[in-house]
Image (tube, coloured by chain):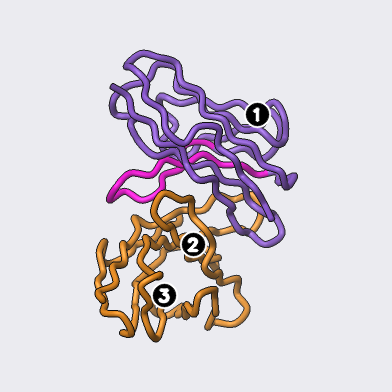
Chain colours: A orange, B purple
Amino acid sequence: AQSVTQLGSHVSVSEGALVLLRCNYSSSVPPYLFWYVQYPNQGLQLLLKYTSAATLVKGINGFEAEFKKSETSFHLTKPSAHMSDAAEYFCAVSENFGNEKLTFGTGTRLTIIP
Amino acid sequence: DVKVTQSSRYLVKRTGEKVFLECVQDMDHENMFWYRQDPGLGLRLIYFSYDVKMKEKGDIPEGYSVSREKKERFSLILESASTNQTSMYLCATRDGTTGELFFGEGSRLTVL
């Protein structure tokens, strides 16, 4: 069975500082991994995805994530936080690229301090 | 652009009422999903569908049913609403080629 653990339900960083949001996964097969972002009063939108190609994945808005099989991790980073990055971030795992469902983590709310 | 439209952004219902949440997509995706989102619990899958008239239970199907009579429409039904079903409900479709989920804006349901 697949699962995702996001460490830290709330993260605060200063504007311009490094953003690091943690995600660890469990999967019985090589996983497909996703990061989604949810802005207030909106649905979720895809930030980036890992599909067994490059282990360092670049996404939208300057975010990137690195797949580390040995650590079963897929942490999300951004070198310099912007006020507009304030949102909730969800990590998700899937064992199949087609019909299989995605399993989501519990989310991390990112606050940016001016 | 994929568009996933949920019929109601906000609903207030009373305990015992039957509730319909409608979701329509315009990209001809085969796979559609209903999640509920609660603080501290993330997104939990209620039901999903691979094709017309096909449905599969997710992780928390109790108290819910679904209907998919047409490919573009996936409805979530609460036969007898209860206060513990107060939540944000999110519909999504999945691109079978890229694996990406596309979400609607959500329906916030309050059951009094």
**Dividing the image into 4 quarters, which one contains the N terminus of chain B?**
bottom right
Residue at 36% x, 79% y is A81
Residue stretch in magenta: B31-47
- Mark 3 or mark 2, which is nearer the start of the sequence? 2
Say which of marks 2 and 3 sits in front: 3
Distance (Cα) linking label 2 and label 1: 31 Å
Label 2's element?
Answer: loop
Both labels 2 and 1 in a single chain:
no
On the image, the x and y values in percent for residue B83 come to: 28, 25
The answer to which of B80 and B19 lies nearer the viewer is B19
Distance (Cα) linking label 2 and label 3: 22 Å
The answer to which of A85 and B34 lies nearer the viewer is A85
Tag 2: amino acid: Ser
Residue at 40% x, 74% y is A73
The residue that mark 2 highlights is: A28
Circles 2 and 1 in contact, beta carbons < 8 Å:
no
Say which of marks 2 and 1 sits in front: 1
Most prominent secondary structure in the magenta stretch?
strand
Label 1's element?
Answer: strand
Q: Which mark is residue B68?
A: 1
- The subunit letter for the residue under badge 1 reads B
Q: Which mark is residue A76?
A: 3
Q: Is residue A46 above or below residue A22?
A: above
Distance (Cα) linking label 1 and label 3: 36 Å
On the image, the x and y values in percent for residue B104 come to: 54, 45
Residue B43 falls inside the magenta stretch: yes
For the view shown, which residue lies furthest in the front direction?
Answer: A114
Residue at 49% x, 80% y is A62
- The subunit letter for the residue under badge 3 reads A
Residue A94 falls inside the magenta stretch: no
Tag 3: amino acid: Leu
On the image, the x and y values in percent for residue A111 come to: 28, 68
